[in-house]
């Protein structure tokens, strides 16, 4: 029972790390992102490959043209190997992209292949490779200032993440 409990806790810590990272990337929060990777980690997104410092400089502040992102994590297949783990996590990432003349809503489906390491009792990513499975361009984005479906918003905190994230205040 003790080994099963240890495995369960290790898996939960790994999943928690993945969620913190997705939240950090969506908000371009260097603290959350730094807490998910080991400083000597390597990241390869196909369009970017580098060490952690290079990755952090790339993702924060992020491209000005990407005004909003949302990473939805699916199931994680986790293989524990002592103080190491190999993890495949399904991801769908939404991106609102400013094309200069208009903003467009796009979505990418893929998988993160992460090598995790536990150091001093803490699980973090030691290396990541992003595999892309599909991409969709949904076309012109709505104007948040107009509300949704023709209905105006009742308060300014509904303006979308690109213009200040109300959840930061909520969790403060």
Image (cartoon, rainbow, N blue to C red):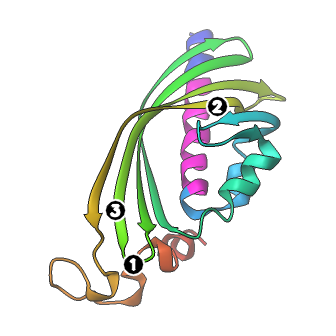
The span from disc 3 to disc 1 (Cα, nearest Å) is 14 Å
* Residue 118 image offset from top left, x and y in percent: 75, 25
Q: Residue furthest front?
A: 101
Report the front residue among 96 and 112.
96
Q: Residue furthest left?
A: 150
Question: Label 2 crowding class (10 Å Cα cut-off): few <14, some 14-19, many 20+?
Answer: many
The span from disc 2 to disc 1 (Cα, nearest Å) is 34 Å
Question: Label 1 crowding class (10 Å Cα cut-off): few <14, some 14-19, many 20+?
Answer: few
The majority secondary structure of the magenta stretch comes to helix
Residue at (72, 59) in percent of width and height? 30
Q: Secondary structure at mark 1?
A: loop
Residue at (56, 23) in percent of width and height? 87
Numbered mark located on residue 101 in the image: 1
Q: Which residue is mark 3?
A: 105
Q: Quadrant of residue 81?
A: top right
Report the front residue among 32 and 55.
55
* Residue 45 image offset from top left, x and y in percent: 59, 38
Q: Which residue is mark 2?
A: 128
Q: Nearer the viewer, mark 2 or mark 1?
A: 1
Which quarter of the image is occupied by the N terminus?
Answer: top right
């Amino acid at each position: 029972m003790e080994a099963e409990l240890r495995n369960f806790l290790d898996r939960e810590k790994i999943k928690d790390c993945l969620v913190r990272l997705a939240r950090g990337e969506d908000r371009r929060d260097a603290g959350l992102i730094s807490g998910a990777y080991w400083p000597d980690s390597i990241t390869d997104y196909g369009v970017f490959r580098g060490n952690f410092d290079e990755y952090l400089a790339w993702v924060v502040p992020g491209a000005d043209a990407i005004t909003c992102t949302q990473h939805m994590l699916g199931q994680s297949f986790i293989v524990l190997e002592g103080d190491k783990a190999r993890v495949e996590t399904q991801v769908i990432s939404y991106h609102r992209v400013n094309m200069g003349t208009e903003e467009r809503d796009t979505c990418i489906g893929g998988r993160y292949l992460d090598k995790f390491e536990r150091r001093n009792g803490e699980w973090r990513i030691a290396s990541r490779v992003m595999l892309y499975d599909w991409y969709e361009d949904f076309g012109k984005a709505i104007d948040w200032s107009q509300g949704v479906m023709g209905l105006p918003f009742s308060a300014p905190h509904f303006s979308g993440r690109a213009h200040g994230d109300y959840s930061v205040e909520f969790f403060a």
